[in-house]
Amino acid sequence: MKKTLIAFTVLSSVIFTTAFAVYEQANRSIDKDYTLKFSTSLASGTFYGLEGKVYFSPSEYTNSKIDISVDASTINTGNSLKDTHAKSQDWLNVASFPFVKFASTEITKENSSYIITGYLEICGVKKLMKIPASYTEINGRGIFKGDFKINREEFHVNGSGIKAKMVGSEIQVTFNIPTSKIG
């Protein structure tokens, strides 16, 4: 009976501590002044409509989680004809796949940067990615910054015609995502 009580007490402490750590990390919202940019050899622009949940604490990064999505129809290249074409079935196919999504599976630290590993989903295709990011926090406002490259063809963003070849396969993504503590 005494061993059972001790085991129960230890288990309860672990559950309470874990729940408290997740509760602390759940207190982040994505601020509206974020930037999410992309560039290729022929086109560049931004996406808007970024939403999601950020469970993050620098002291508990191994228990952290990032689950975000961006509205693919918000693509803005500065050219309405390019935007319409980018939303078409040939490229992002926003009618069938309205969101680009990212869900982390692990966050590790490398020197002063973080490596956010997770699944990036574009056009219904999920690929495991490792995204390097810096994180700074001042007065409860945390900012994730970084950049990474993807091969658009791996996500079935193929395009058509000569412009598809001119755009190139590689897309550079740059982000600056400020977050604020909630509560």
Image: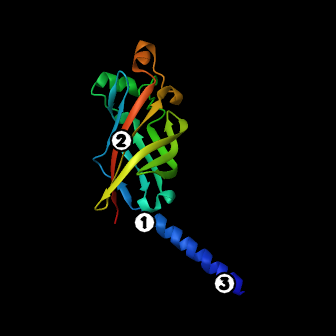
Is residue 32 in view from this perspective?
yes
Q: Nearer the viewer, residue 130 or 91?
A: 130
Q: Earlier in the sequence, mark 2 or mark 3?
A: 3
Q: Quadrant of the N terminus?
A: bottom right
**Mark 2 vs mark 3, CA separation in Å:** 50 Å
Q: Is residue 175 above or below residue 31?
A: above
**Mark 3 vs mark 1, CA separation in Å:** 28 Å
Residue beneath disc 3:
5
Residue 119, numbered label? none
Residue 24, numbered label? 1
Q: Is residue 169 above or below residue 73?
A: above
Residue 175, numbered label? 2
Percent coordinates x, y for residue 102 in the rendering: 47, 44
**Mark 2 vs mark 1, CA separation in Å:** 24 Å
Percent coordinates x, y for residue 123 in the rendering: 50, 33
In the shown orientation, is residue 21 left or right of residue 82? Answer: right
Q: Is residue 69 above or below residue 90?
A: below
Query: Mark 1 Cα within 10 Å, few/some/many (few <14, many 20+)?
Result: some
Outermost right residue:
1
Q: Nearer the viewer, residue 160 or 57?
A: 57
Q: Earlier in the sequence, mark 2 or mark 1?
A: 1
Outermost top residue:
162
So how many labels did they put on this image?
3
Percent coordinates x, y for residue 161 in the rendering: 44, 13
In the shown orientation, is residue 124 left or right of residue 148? Answer: right
Circle 1: element type: helix
